[in-house]
Amino acid sequence: MSKFNRIHLPFEKREIPYLDDILYIDINDDNNIIVIDEDENEIKPINGLYKLPFSIGEKEVSINFLIAFTYIPIYKANEKVFNWLVLTIDDTRPLHPNNLIWKSKLEDLEDPLNPGFYIIPRYTRYCINQEGTIKRRYSPVVYGKIAKDLSMLSESEREERIRIVAVRKMEPSKENTYLQATLLNDAQKDDSTPIHRLLGYVFLEYGNNLTSLTINHKNGLQYDNRIENIEWISASKNNVHAKDEGLNTARMPIVVIDLLKNCAFKFKSISDAVLYTKSFFHVIHKLIDTNVSYRNYFYKTYVKDCDVYSIGEYKFELKDIDPLENRKCFAKNIRTNIIILAKNYVELSEMVKYTSNYVLNAISSVSNYIRGGYIFGFVDELKDKNITLSKDQIDFYDKKDKQKSDRNKNLNVIRTPIKITNIQTKESVYYSNFQKASTEFFNKNRGYIKDYFNSRGNPKTVEIKNYLVEKLNSKSDTQE
């Protein structure tokens, strides 16, 4: 079996446990997950199911079940296991043990060593109760001295305390925030996992598909993880609920108090306020209703029908501000000192031949944003802009532009056009680069064709399945 694809393996080759015969899960040259015997002969499924001789009898199982059964060694092979489901958490991600989860009845998950605690799917070294307390199912090895607060406990009490997993706030500075814990999952990786999601895996029903589902807190309190307060819902419904409860502040109107202009302005969202204040999104998000100023601005939650906002004993009247589409913009050429004026950023982008998003990002930059030899900004801020550059600064930006141009030329060389020909029918199709051909024609990962060339000494043509893949010299050789 070719080894060049090993770097793309989602997991290593491993023997399937509790079988009378010796069989393995592996991956073939086409990056497909297969079942093989000791002589590396592939075992073919029948109607998508493998008929295999387990120690408790012959069973028909899917490839998902075999992956979970082999790489998530949670349960002993008994009759119950084969009645459980193996679900994919996210259909957009590749087939991997970390993307699979067992689904079984609650009574089957109860940990016999810890009454009232239930084994957590995907994190089966741990168990959890309805209050959200997480315990290690087996005592960890503790090195060094015992902590002072545990030294007075008996050996059994000390062991019980050590087995409890620490829970912390996701955002320590906030009161209303999620609780989480760091656990070692069944794919041998550390995960910082929200407690409410662990409770959902164990105590809530979620159908046969977890893709796009998330946990919603019914009362809006993110730390309230009572079973009756959480539910599995779609992401879109969760966003609607967050907006109704006032939790999604990023898309809610806010008020910016401008100390220099001695008034307040209303904005549709934090993103619009960023363009006005030249501040940062995360800074504004943290400072809302904190009475802490940043660059001469205070931030308040918008209250309907309120025309006056106060900071201490000072009052600020709410005034209208021109929308972004009506604010005049300028662009100054750093080499010729010519200033271009426009009615708005869209018109300015057409004048300087850049996209409107680039111009908008340039205008909203905290410092002077130079792109392609221009400094951008609003006309009413023209006098505040430091738009005078020395010769050394201009030479510096000329050098950056040249480096970018050279980099783009190299990218054009890397983007080698290729031709794919059917060996039998002689029909050909053309693609502008390896990535498109790999994903669109072969429906594989982006480096699929490139790996074939690299593993064979980078020839001009290679044969993949029943197709001849040829590298062309230039884009002019391709056909639409």
Image: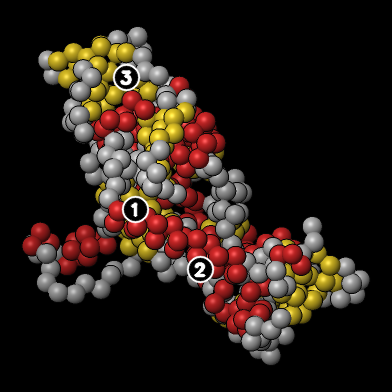
Quarter the N terminus occupies: bottom right
Disc 3/disc 1 C-alpha distance (Å):
37 Å
Is tag 3's residue or tag 1's residue first in the polypeptide sequence? 3
What's the residue type where badge 3 is placed?
Phe
Above or below, 36 relative to 308: below
Task: Find residue 53 and report its horizontal and vertical position in percent.
Answer: 68, 77
Task: Find residue 160 and report its horizontal and vertical position in percent.
Answer: 24, 61
The residue lying at 42 percent from left, 69 percent from top is 188
Task: Find residue 421 and report its horizontal and vertical position in percent.
Answer: 82, 71
Task: Find residue 107 and report its horizontal and vertical position in percent.
Answer: 49, 53
Which is closer to the viewer, label 3 or label 1? Answer: 1
Above or below, 158 relative to 473: above
Label 3: element kind: strand
What's the residue type where badge 1 is placed?
Ile
Mark 2: few, some, or many residues within 10 Å (few <14, many ≥20)? many
Is 48 left or right of 182, judged from the image as shown? right
Above or below, 461 relative to 68: below
Residue with the mark numbered 3: 265
Residue with the mark numbered 1: 394
